Image (spheres, helix red, strand yellow):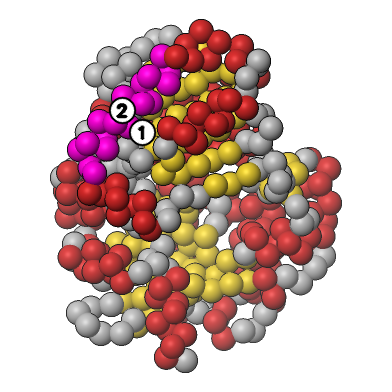
């Protein structure tokens, strides 16, 4: 039986899947998330559910249904119970401000989640699905008609394209290859640009990075490099070292100045970085930015501050990368003291911040001139950013504009 993720689905899709489990209901449990009951949240619970449970259901039979009414259902094999509980605890922390009552047993408030044993609660689950979809249809019939004509449904069958997991021996082989091979052909660039008024993008600097997809296709096709968090972290540290080496050994114009690198905090405190640092003049250093993922920073803030202090002393600039609206509350800008902050754009960005004044209060403190909005895929994202007084952008749509000028 396939493990699936299905968006904008209806009762029939879920019933068909449940029918495929006939005779085995005792092996499965279900969780119903009332995403539409979350108020004043900086992130979509619906999306968080998909992000946190997708890898779990890939490994065992199960399904994630993202419903038309913004609610979500996760059906999982009980073999994954511990991983499911860990994901639930993570979601609890992300939405802590929105919880009314904390459920010690399940890690979440009963106000926006319900748990079902399929062997005993199948009828109750189906009734809940039917009732909530009917209410949503009555309240949003016009919107539902539009969606049904647009073809928004997405179906992913993981059983047909199941990727192998990365293993320690495989990681070791990859690291040996990385240490002895020139991968400069896998280095990609994406520009961070200034856009004021109706003016065309003006490049501030280029972010340079190694494409993980291209690296996978080249070295280990069919392997999911992100399937093990710790092994992938180890791999990115190896990529950091290789990137630093390639930059100082190549004389490409775009690797001399005005570029940024997304890097691990630990790499800055390594001998590899000291060799990289010796390669650049003080003038060039002032144009180079090091980007640190917010999760890497939060895992050890003291070490980050040490690394950042060293970089700033040497004349480099620093940027906090990967800031989503749900993580903003963990960013202490005064303590972290970075030159730039990079926010991740998503379709609900403007709607979320309209309901939550925290974003505006935070960016007023930071200075809008230091904020970059990334993952810009359409003109609406640019207009949204400009309406907030932000003029630094990065993403595929920006690259498309730049390509048209070249």
Residue at numbered disc 1? 71
Distance of label 2 from label 1 (alpha carbons): 9 Å
| Residue beneath the point at 38% across and 58% down | 150
Report the span colored magenta: 124-141
Q: Quadrant of residue 254?
A: bottom right
Q: Position of residue 239 (x, y in %)?
A: 67, 58
Residue plotted at (28% across, 67% down): 380
State yes or no: residue 159 in magenta.
Answer: no
Q: Characterize the magenta stretch by its predominant secondary structure.
A: helix
Classify mark 1: residues with Cα within 10 Å, few (<14), some (14-19) or many (20+): many
Residue 332 versus residue 72: which sits nearer the camera?
72
Q: Is residue 381 above or below residue 320?
A: below
Which label was assigned to residue 132? 2
**Residue for point 75% across, 44% down:** 164
Residue 182 tag number: none
On screen, residue 168 versus residue 279, left or right, reads: right
Circle 2 Cα neighbour tier, 10 Å, few/some/many (<14 / 14–19 / ≥20): some
Q: Earlier in the sequence, mark 2 or mark 1?
A: 1
Q: Position of residue 5 (x, y in %)?
A: 54, 40
Quadrant housing the N terminus? top right
Residue 90 seen in the current view = no
Figure check: 177 above or below 348: below
Secondary structure beneath dot 1 equals loop
Quadrant for residue 208, please give it: bottom right
Pointers 2 and 1 in contact (C-beta within 8 Å): yes
Residue shown at 31%/76% (left/top)? 194
71 or 306: nearer the viewer: 71
């Amino acid at each position: 039986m396939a493990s699936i993720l299905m968006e904008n689905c209806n009762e029939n899709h879920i019933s068909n899947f449940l029918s495929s489990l006939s005779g085995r209901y005792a092996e499965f449990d279900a969780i119903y998330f009332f995403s539409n009951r979350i108020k004043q949240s900086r992130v979509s619970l619906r999306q968080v559910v998909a992000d946190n449970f997708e890898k779990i259901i890939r490994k065992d039979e199960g399904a994630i249904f993202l419903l038309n009414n913004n609610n979500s259902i996760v059906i999982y094999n009980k073999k994954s119970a511990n991983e499911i509980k860990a994901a639930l605890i993570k979601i609890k922390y992300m939405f802590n401000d929105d919880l009314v009552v904390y459920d010690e047993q399940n890690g979440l408030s009963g106000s926006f989640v319900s748990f079902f044993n399929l062997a005993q609660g199948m009828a109750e689950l189906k009734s809940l699905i039917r009732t909530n979809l009917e209410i949503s249809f009555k309240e949003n019939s016009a919107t539902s008609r539009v969606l049904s004509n647009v073809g928004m449904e997405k179906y992913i069958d993981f059983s047909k394209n199941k990727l192998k997991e990365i293993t320690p021996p495989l990681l070791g082989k990859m690291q040996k290859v990385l240490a002895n091979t020139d991968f400069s052909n896998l280095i990609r660039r994406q520009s961070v640009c200034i856009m004021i008024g109706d003016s065309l993008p003006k490049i501030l600097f280029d972010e340079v990075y190694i494409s993980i997809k291209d690296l996978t296709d080249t070295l280990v096709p069919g392997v999911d490099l992100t399937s093990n968090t710790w092994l992938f972290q180890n791999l990115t540290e190896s990529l950091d070292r290789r990137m630093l080496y390639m930059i100082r050994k190549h004389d490409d114009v775009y690797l001399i100045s005005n570029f940024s690198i997304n890097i691990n905090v630990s790499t800055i405190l390594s001998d590899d970085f000291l060799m990289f640092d010796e390669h650049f003049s003080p003038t060039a250093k002032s144009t180079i930015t090091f980007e640190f993922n917010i999760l890497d920073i939060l895992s050890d803030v003291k070490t980050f501050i040490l690394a950042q202090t060293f970089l700033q002393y040497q004349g480099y600039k620093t940027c906090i990368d990967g800031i989503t609206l749900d993580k903003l509350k963990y960013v202490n800008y005064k303590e972290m003291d970075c030159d730039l902050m990079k926010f991740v754009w998503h379709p609900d960005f403007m709607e979320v911040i309209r309901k939550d004044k925290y974003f505006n209060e935070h960016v007023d403190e930071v200075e809008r001139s230091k904020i970059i909005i990334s993952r810009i895929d359409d003109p609406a994202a640019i207009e949204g950013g400009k309406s907030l007084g932000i003029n630094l952008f990065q993403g595929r749509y920006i690259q498309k504009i730049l390509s048209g000028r070249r």
